[in-house]
């Protein structure tokens, strides 16, 4: 089992809709989780961090963490065409030092 | 405040050539990382430096070496490039380890092709 798994997509949503991106993780991954947005040909950009069970909201973005079920999700409200990108989920793994492990990303397409 | 910078942006090498990728950060971060990103494989950690003066292997270190020159700079060296090292290379940095300290910030990347 991969440590962090994401559906590669693409996830297609119309403009103005809610986009829901999901990520599951293995027993080795814990504590802190991150969502990065990556536009084609660009570097990953951190958009959300979540450390505790429950929801965390920042503008149009809501991150949700459920440690019992081992999943993390990112909701994007009022999706815009400019949100079209690949979203990377990452969690921390401790092997003497806390490192990030990344999923392969979900491609989101928001159509006007 | 430039964040994380990387040079060069693009590079083409022939098999067997060597090169060094440079990375610098101006955020006073303690930890720095080198990743490679390949289609379908995601971001994979090559080497990291938890703090100035230390370096450790990540998931895919074979064929690479690193130097943490000072707190700001962390370089990645390919001694004898192979076509399997064709990839996009990202440098990242974080304040440190633990809780919010390991939020990582990425540089713009180097696109490397080995012929």
Image: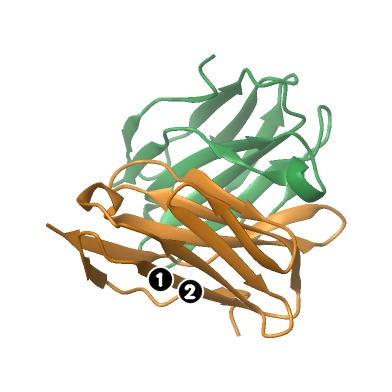
Chain colours: A orange, B green
Front-most of B64 and A80? A80
Where does residue A39 sit, x and y in percent of width and height?
32, 47
Residue at image mark 1: A20
Residue drawn at point x = 81 percent, y = 27 percent: B52
> Residue pushed farthest top?
B1
Residue drawn at point x = 42 percent, y = 51 percent: A37
Q: Give a yes or no on whether discs 1 and 2 share a subunit.
A: yes
Mark 2 residue crowding within 10 angstroms, few (<14) / some (14–19) / many (20+): some
Q: What's the distance in space between the residues labelled 1 and 2, CA to CA?
A: 7 Å
Front-most of A69 and B1? A69
Mark 1 residue crowding within 10 angstroms, few (<14) / some (14–19) / many (20+): some
Mark yes or no: residue B91 visible.
yes
Front-most of B79 and B69? B69
Residue at image mark 2: A22
Q: Is residue B75 above or below residue A47?
A: above
Front-most of B113 and A31? A31
Which image quadrant for residue A50? bottom right
> Is label 1 in contact with label 2 (beta carbons under 8 Å)?
yes
């Amino acid at each position: 089992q991969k440590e962090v798994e994401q559906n590669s997509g693409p996830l297609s949503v119309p403009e103005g809709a809610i986009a829901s991106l999901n990520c599951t993780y293995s027993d080795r991954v814990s504590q802190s989780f991150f969502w990065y947005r990556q536009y084609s040909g660009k570097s990953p950009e951190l958009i959300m961090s979540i450390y505790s069970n429950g929801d965390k909201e920042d503008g149009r973005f809501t991150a949700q963490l459920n440690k019992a079920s081992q999943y993390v999700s990112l909701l994007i409200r009022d999706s815009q065409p400019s949100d079209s990108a690949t979203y990377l989920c990452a969690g921390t793994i401790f092997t003497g030092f806390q490192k990030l492990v990344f999923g392969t990303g979900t491609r989101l397409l928001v159509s006007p | 405040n430039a964040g994380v910078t990387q040079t060069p942006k693009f590079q083409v090498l022939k098999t067997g050539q060597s090169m060094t990728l440079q990375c610098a950060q101006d955020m006073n971060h303690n930890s720095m990382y080198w990743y490679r990103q390949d289609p379908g494989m995601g971001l994979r950690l090559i080497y990291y430096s938890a703090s100035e003066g230390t370096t450790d292997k990540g998931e895919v270190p074979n064929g690479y070496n690193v130097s943490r020159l000072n707190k700001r700079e962390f370089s990645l060296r390919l001694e004898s490039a192979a076509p399997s090292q064709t990839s996009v290379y990202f440098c990242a940095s974080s304040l440190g380890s633990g809780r919010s300290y390991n939020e990582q910030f990425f540089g713009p990347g180097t696109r490397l092709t080995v012929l």
